[in-house]
Amino acid sequence: MIGTRQKLLIPDATISPVWKNNPDVKIGMISYLGYPVNWPDGETFGTICLIDNKENHFSEVIQEFIIELRQNLESDLAFLVNQQKLKESEQEAKKIQERF
């Protein structure tokens, strides 16, 4: 998912040739829905996901909700980056003022 930057939906890992032998299946991850979360520059921050211990196709409403949560997280990350830039600018301005 992180490499493709696309959602990953696995309704039932136990029947998926790709996922049925995943170690997480042995500890109860049967279904998975995940989206990448990115920094403002596009680099990957992490993921936001839902895991269920039974088959789950995750309705459109649930998927839209997770997308909204991801958007909120990405907005918060952008805010943090902007706050850091502002702090650095203020420190630079203070250094310039101290010279005069």
Image: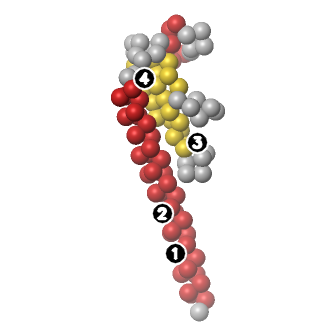
What x and y, as percent, mark residue 49?
Answer: 45, 30
Sequence-wise first label, 3 or 4: 3
Amino acid at dot 4? Ile
User: On the image, numbered disc 2 is attached to which residue?
Assistant: 83
- Residue tagged by mark 3? 44
Residue underneath mark 4 = 51
Q: Are marks 3 and 4 in contact (CB under 8 Å)?
A: no
Residue type, numbered disc 3:
Thr
* Residue 78 place in picture, x, y as percent: 49, 54
How packed is label 2: few (under 14 Cα within 10 Å), some, or many (20 or more)? few
Three-letter code, disc 1: Glu
| Left/right of residue 64 with respect to residue 10 in the rendered view | left
Sequence-first disc among 2 and 3: 3
- Image quadrant assignment for residue 23: top right
Q: Which of pointers 4 and 2 lies earlier in the amino acid sequence?
A: 4
Residue 40 image position (x, y, % from top left): 55, 51
Q: Are marks 4 and 1 in contact (CB under 8 Å)?
A: no
Q: Secondary structure at mark 3?
A: strand
